[in-house]
Image (cartoon, helix red, strand yellow):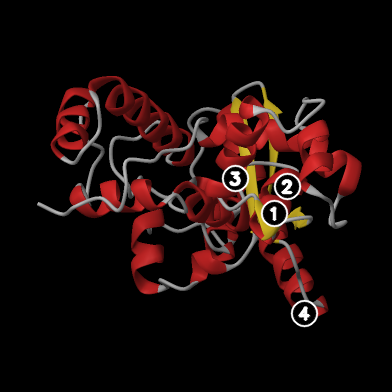
Amino acid sequence: MAKVRSPNYPALDLAGAIEAMRPVWKAEHRNKMAKAVLARHLGYTSLNGRALAKIGAVRAYGLIDGSGDDLRVSDDAVTVLASPDKVNLQYREAMERLALKPSLFADIKKQFPSALPSESNLTYWLIQNGFTQDAAGKATKAFLTTMRVVYDGETSYNPPESLAELPEETMQAPSLETSRSILDRHPSAIKRPVLQEVFNLEEGPVTLTFPVELSADSYQDLADHLAIFLRKAKRRADKASRPGEEDE
């Protein structure tokens, strides 16, 4: 059985720590600040025990860099706090790094590498590794809540890929290939940051996923493929309005 480094755990789950950081980001952005200033942004008038516990939590997750009176919002915290949505790859990768920054959480994931443990199983493991019953219960709740936020409620650490992360190939001329086969053939494709537009029609939503950056040539290619798709969609719509006719 792996031995955890110490019976310490963040006082907040990751979602709570991120929310606590929003006033800090709004007021300071990347400016340096003293610990007392950070405490005030977190809602405290002095460096009391509660303030230090919250500062310890945001630092445990790597939301704050630096030491002493030379603190600033970390790069991963900026990625999360400034992100316009929660589906882009950079946001999700930053969230995973933040979630596993606490040494205890990294130890737990090593002990349970493929799927989240049950609450009772994790509590028992923590007690066996030096936690009191009360501390084990609180640490278990913080870990499981954090992991479920990062992995969208999945019990596995490797949930299915979001449609928002599929490569631009999925938007080319219609094909019978599945999203999974495309990812298998192009494993590096999902590394590209993407955006998503959703158009709600009477029959259901139409989702367009595309790379954040497009060259002039790629833009023209996309326009050509969309034109082909729209022509085929029009033929299907025309056929639906005239039952009994054959496809062209």
Mark 4 or mark 2: which is in front?
2
Is 80 in front, or is 179? 80
Q: Is residue 196 left or right of residue 148?
A: right
Mark found first going from the N terminus, 4 or 2: 2
Q: What kind of residue is marked 2?
A: Ser
Mark 2 or mark 3: which is in front?
2
Secondary element type, mark 4: helix
Name the residue at 85% across, 57% down.
32
Residue 87 marker = 3
Q: Which residue is mark 2?
A: 83
Q: Which residue is mark 4?
A: 217
Secondary element type, mark 2: loop
Q: CA distance from mark 1 to mark 2?
A: 6 Å
Q: Which residue is mark 1?
A: 79
Mark 4 or mark 3: which is in front?
3
Q: CA distance from mark 4 to mark 2?
A: 28 Å
Vertical position of residue 78 compared to residue 204: above or below? below
Q: Give coordinates of residue 101: x percent, y percent.
A: 47, 53
Q: CA distance from mark 1 to mark 4?
A: 29 Å
Q: Is residue 152 visible?
A: no
Secondary element type, mark 1: helix
Q: Determine contact: label 4, label 3, CB under 8 Å.
A: no
Is 220 in front, or is 57? 57
Q: Give coordinates of residue 233: x percent, y percent.
A: 62, 44
Mark found first going from the N terminus, 4 or 3: 3
